[in-house]
Amino acid sequence: MAVDEGTARVDSWIWSVRLTKTRSLAGTACRAGHVRVNGERVKPAHSVKIGDEVRVRLDDWTRVVVVSRVISKRVGASVAVECYVDNSPPRPAAALGPAPVALRDRGAGRPTKRDRRALEQLFSQPGR
């Protein structure tokens, strides 16, 4: 694991601690103004150090983390959570609407494997 005692680029650090899936997405988020360090919008090359508060806007949720360890290489999820203190508000509940209903024609027989997979996918949606 690459541990830097000093600083690291914010896009690299966000990717390394698994707040984004790719470094490219982290850089894009920085350029779009979705990343703030200590309250200020930053470019991808901005340096982060221990104690900095990093806010990352992801979809409809803002992650608020405080840097507790500076790394520049991607690490496993169990190590990544040790690199920051998560102060994020709870994730908002999605507007779910009514629950899905699986209807089959009467007399259609047993569901095929494809039908069963479609039903499993329908009923395994997050938040349901």
Image (spheres, helix red, strand yellow):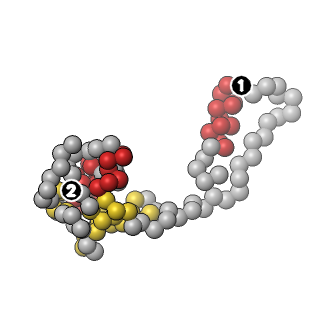
Q: Is residue 32 visible?
A: no
> Foreground residue, 51 or 62?
51
Identify the image quadrant of residue 6. Answer: bottom left
Dot 2 lies on which element? loop
Residue type pointed to by label 2: Val
Q: Quickly name the residue at label 1.
A: 112
Identify the image quadrant of residue 117. Answer: top right
Compared to residue 102, the image places residue 6 above or below, namely below
Q: Quadrant of the N terminus?
A: top left
**Residue at image point 15% right, 53% down:** 4
Percent of width and height locating residue 67: 27, 62
Judged left or right of residue 113, residue 10 is: left
**Residue at image point 69% right, 30% down:** 115
Instruction: Indicate which disc residue 38 carries.
Output: none
Percent of width and height locating residue 44: 20, 58
Q: Residues within 10 Å of mark 2 (few under 14, many from 20)?
A: many
Compared to residue 72, the image places residue 10 above or below, namely below
Judged left or right of residue 113, residue 21 is: left
Q: Residues within 10 Å of mark 1 (few under 14, many from 20)?
A: few
Instruction: Indicate which disc residue 70 carries.
Output: 2
Dot 1 lies on which element? loop
